[in-house]
Amino acid sequence: MRLCLINPSNPLVSMVKIRESRWNRYRVWKPLSLMVLAGLTPREWAISIVDENLGAPDYPAMPRPDLVGITAFTSQANRAYEVASYFRRLGVPVIMGGIHATMCLDEVMARVDSVVTGEAESVWPLVLEDVLHGSLKRRYDGGLAEMSAVPCARHDLLATGYAFGAIQTTRGCPLNCTFCSVTAFNGARYRQRPVMDVVREFQSIREKYVLVVDDNLIGTRTDHIGRAKDLFRAMAEANLQKEWIAQATINFADDEELLVLAAKAGCRGVFIGFESPSTEGLLEIGKKFNLLKDRDFRASVRRIQRHNILVTGSFIIGLDVDEPGIGKRIAEVSSQYGVDNLNVLFLTPLPGTRLWEQMKAEDRIALNSFPDDWRYFTLTYPVARYRHLSLDAAIQEVVSCNRNFYSLPRVLRRLCSNVWQRRAPLISFVGNISYRRNSRLDCKAYADFKYQRGSRYDCVSKMQTKPSLGHNIEAIESASRSLSPMT
Ligand code: B12
Ligand code: SF4
């Protein structure tokens, strides 16, 4: 039996534009979900994984599969439906799973034969049994998996074409920020895989560089951090010879022993969500965690960097507290914090989040013709109506933020400082150049975006009839005024 697992591509995602920027070659990441599913699949199935991010294959030339499994983030949903429809026309049953299928169940059920919601570990073997017996059900719910049931992913199936391997060591996040899907999907309980399972899986990864996909590798509580230390000790003892990057909360900086162990285990970079430069902004999105301990962010970043670990800071533009000038402010604040890279994104109501519920209730989701508009839910397009920023102004803030932070003098200053401190200057330089190039590609994409979707923001009259929902009518009027005639 042939199983074909597919990761659909969205050409609007800047990091998959390899032809336009060769630096993106270092930023195409392996679809771990499909490698985990393959790890759960009995050996009698012949499995192929198609990652469209490396280029869509010639499907008609492929041997006909007996079953197709498709994964999708929300931004990949449209392409997922196209691929599903192609295989269904051939009479091949199509199953979809992952975050979008879980959050938009009805939409997905209407377009595929069967849907797996939640984490797949507890149900995937049953799904395959049902396929073999011709009794595939319309829906399976995996809920939250036991972490000891997470198998070693099949890293051998996607052996070439990637700069980084991928692994997961924990799931879930207790912080439940309003804009983030993780707590809704993976739960608030922080669940950790057994340390030795992780070490063994690391050993099966061929790439020297690895992305640890955990949303927060170290967790927020003392016992979480104790486990992270155990993991790092075991990784160092196993002498894995890997270098890896991960995501963590800013408390990573607070424990010297944790930093020493992480560096010894191969940590070279960490991605931290600062989200907003203001207290009001952090309160608005529910990330009070960043406000604890009266934190000095610059000192925290420095403490991490002293261990030769690069820091990428992530911020959001479009919060209700954000006013014109926020882009420049974020660029300045990030430079003050001393981060090596900056990732700035539009506030995006992703289905299943608290933000989605709020914006939907307030009629602030501007791009709401689904499933067509999902393609813009990449966090690099403004899909909502922001309180103080018109469509043009929101785009302008992101552009000016990137221009400022990734100006050549600033990039060179960071390079010199990293060379001086012998802190992975090459990796940080490649990161800077890649972000710089992608922000330029995004600028071009915004012109098309405004042409194709700009008129959707032009609904002042509709919103004026609902003042009780808390809209700033002035901001909305200015949004419509600022739309170019092209839109
Ligand atoms: C790694 C990661 C990335 C990598 C992706 C690597 C890749 N090619 O897959 C990179 C950095 C490229 C990335 C990019 C983006 N990401 Co991202 N990413 C993640 C992260 C941190 C981990 C995903 C992961 O690998 N998990 C490990 C696997 C094992 O878990 P899983 O994917 O959930 O799969 C399990 C189940 O869902 C299920 N399953 C999944 N697929 C299928 C398919 C079938 C057939 C079945 C049966 C089951 C099944 O089984 C698996 C085992 O239990 C998640 C956060 C999270 N916790 O999910 C965010 C997350 C998925 N990303 C998110 C977003 C928004 C994006 C971007 C749009 C924006 C951005 N700038 O980051 C882009 C879009 C990229 C694109 N191509 O469209 C959101 C998605 C929300 C949504 N509703 O779509 C998340 C949830 C983060 C968040 N804060 O909300 N991301
Ligand atoms: S943004 Fe980060 S800290 Fe907040 S809920 Fe998501 S994973 Fe947790």
Image (tube, helix red, strand yellow):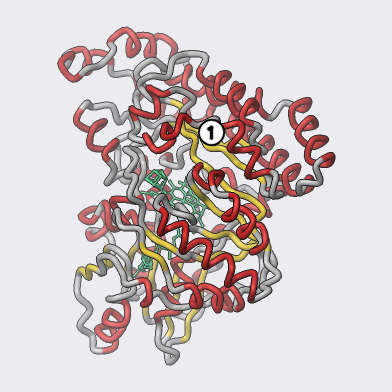
404 in relation to 201, above or below = above
Hey, what amino acid is under mark 1? Val
Q: Position of residue 428 (x, y in %)?
A: 72, 44
Classed neighbour count for the residue bearing mark 1: other residues with Cα under 10 Å, few (<14), some (14–19), many (≥20): many
Q: For the residue labelled by badge 1, is the local secondary structure a helix, a strand or a loop?
A: strand
Residue 457 at x, y = what percent?
35, 22
Instruction: Please give left or right for residue 373 compared with residue 265 in the image.
Output: left
Front one among 114 and 303: 303
Viewer-proximal residue, 227 or 29? 227
As drawn, 348 above or below 69: above
Would residue 264 appear left or right of 323 to someone viewing this image? right
Identified at 49% across, 25% down, the residue is 277
Q: How far across and down, in percent of the image, does residue 433 sit?
A: 72, 39
* Rendered-image quadrant of the N terminus: bottom left
User: Going by the image, does 261 lie left or right of 452?
Assistant: right
Q: Is residue 371 left or right of residue 51?
A: left
Q: Does 117 sit above or below residue 64?
A: above
Q: Which residue is mark 1?
A: 344
Q: Residue at x 55, y 24 (%)?
A: 330
Dividing the image into four equal quarters, which quarter contains ligand 2? top left
The single residue placed furthest to the bottom in the displayed view is 44
As displayed, is residue 26 above or below residue 89?
above
The residue shown at (42%, 31%) is: 291
Label 1 residue near ligand 1, CB within 8 Å:
no
Q: Quadrant of residue 476?
A: top left
Query: In which quadrant of the rendered image does the C terminus lie?
Result: top left
